[in-house]
Amino acid sequence: MTGISILKERKKQIYQKGAEPFSITCGKHSLAGSVSQRACVFCGSRVVLYPIADALHLIHGPIGCAAYTWDIRGALSSGPELHRLSFSTDLQEKDVIFGGEKKLYHALIDLIHEYKPKAAFVYSTCIVGIIGDDVEAVCKKVSRETGVETLPVHSEGFKGTKKDGYKAACEALFKLVGQGSVDNISPYSINILGEFNIGGEAWIIKDYYKRMGVNVVSTMTGDGRVDDVRRSHGAMLNVVQCSGAMTYLADMMKEKYGIPYIRVSYFGLEDMSKALYDVAEYFSHNPEIMTCTQELVRYEISRIYPELQKIKTAVKGKRAAIYVGGAFKAFSLIKALKYIGINVILAGSQTGNDADYEVLRDMCDKGTIILDDANPLELSKYIIEKKADLFIGGVKERPIAYKMGIGFCDHNHERKTPLAGYSGMLNFAREVYLTVTSPVWQFAR
Ligand code: SF4
């Protein structure tokens, strides 16, 4: 035992596999004082929209909010890189007293004049919600005067959980959908939703679809372009990865444009292959697509299989803790880790729902800790008690792993290495191997 106790109010958000009846509370506001690992509403919006590379992203608020999310994703662009500049209205005390609308207006006019973006997103932060700036009205005025569509993102940090930020981002994107021409879109076409081109992942996935004979109209939002989003209503199917972030947009597109959607994950051999086969199945009236998919899967797996087996021999029996944003990623990680012989002793997420946690319960071995909206102390407690060798998470989990003296693998949006697709699975296995077998840990414990 570690001697680290759990706050009384947090106990319902933690479940140990095997305890009966199954019960875990989720979807709640974070508990004050528990230093949640979760990000705010604004950050949720920012991570979704950030990779749209030819749009202007202006954060209306104090400079700290912009710093917090500057270059927040390792999202690459094959063209413009306007997304990598983080603009802020840098609200000061005077603006809080007299209002920040004028400052916002002038910032937008100057930036649009300077950078000539395809569209502009204006993110509301906490203070804007408190002082009550009419961001919508300023955006309308700027759109009218400049001809550049300026979209408010209602992402005041305090008004919910990170999930509400995803929703605000989807609402802003949905305003663009339907504006472009759908001429020359193939009958075998999809949009990829919730793929953010971290380290070039969207390029890997798009290459697979191309080899299958499937056309990608728009990737939302990795290596994203405003005009592609505008014509995305012409696609036949929405393929939703990272479902926590983008299912809301897929639902809206289904209702308004009748586009069905499927949920996929591009992490791990099993889920990656299923993602391709599900799309091939959807277009089953063209059997050539299925034939190409079978060939592709066979080729890609046989290419990486020998090295994966070597890694498995070296890491088999190690224990991993997983804490990620969306639970869907945790599902894929558990399968990928099992594939290389690693046991999962903790699995948690920032934004999982009831159904997600039921799936996690079914996937995990007896004794595994399942956590919703965890804090550093809880994570440390179970890492010690369950003797984890490896922690998989993001920027906020990295220092916990190093303080605990165990290996760490970054599976969050800041990283620069692709972990999706077949080559991504090999990168992931190599990273896991390098960190858990590093001799340094013998000196840290
Ligand atoms: S929006 Fe609010 S909670 Fe989010 S970073 Fe800014 S001040 Fe912090």
Image (spheres, rainbow, N blue to C red):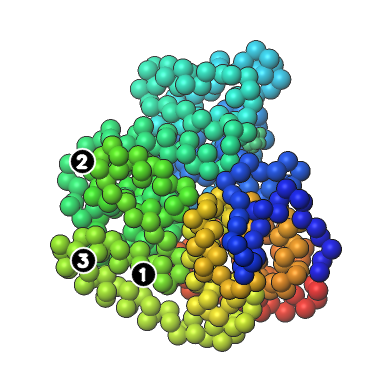
Answer few, some or many: residues within 10 Å of disc 1's Cα (few below 14, many 20 plus, some between 14 and 19): many
Tell me the quadrant of the picture where the C terminus can be found.
bottom right
The image shows residue 402 at horizontal and vertical percentages of: 73, 64
Q: Which residue is the extreme one toward the top?
A: 98
Query: Front-most of 387 and 434?
Result: 387
Q: Is residue 20 left or right of residue 6?
A: left
Tell me the quadrant of the picture where the N terminus can be found.
bottom right
* Residue drawn where x is 21% and y is 40% of the image: 182
Q: Is residue 384 above or below residue 244?
A: below
Q: Amino acid at mark 3?
A: Ile
Q: Which residue is identified by label 2? A: 182
* Residue drawn where x is 28% and y is 61% of the image: 279
* Residue drawn where x is 55% and y is 80% of the image: 341
Q: Is residue 117 above or below residue 293?
A: above
Q: Is residue 264 left or right of residue 10?
A: left
Give the distance between the C-alpha atoms of the residues marked 3 and 1, in whole angstroms: 14 Å
**Secondary structure of residue under mark 2:** loop
Q: Amino acid at mark 2?
A: Val
Marked residue nearer the N-terminal end (2 or 3): 2
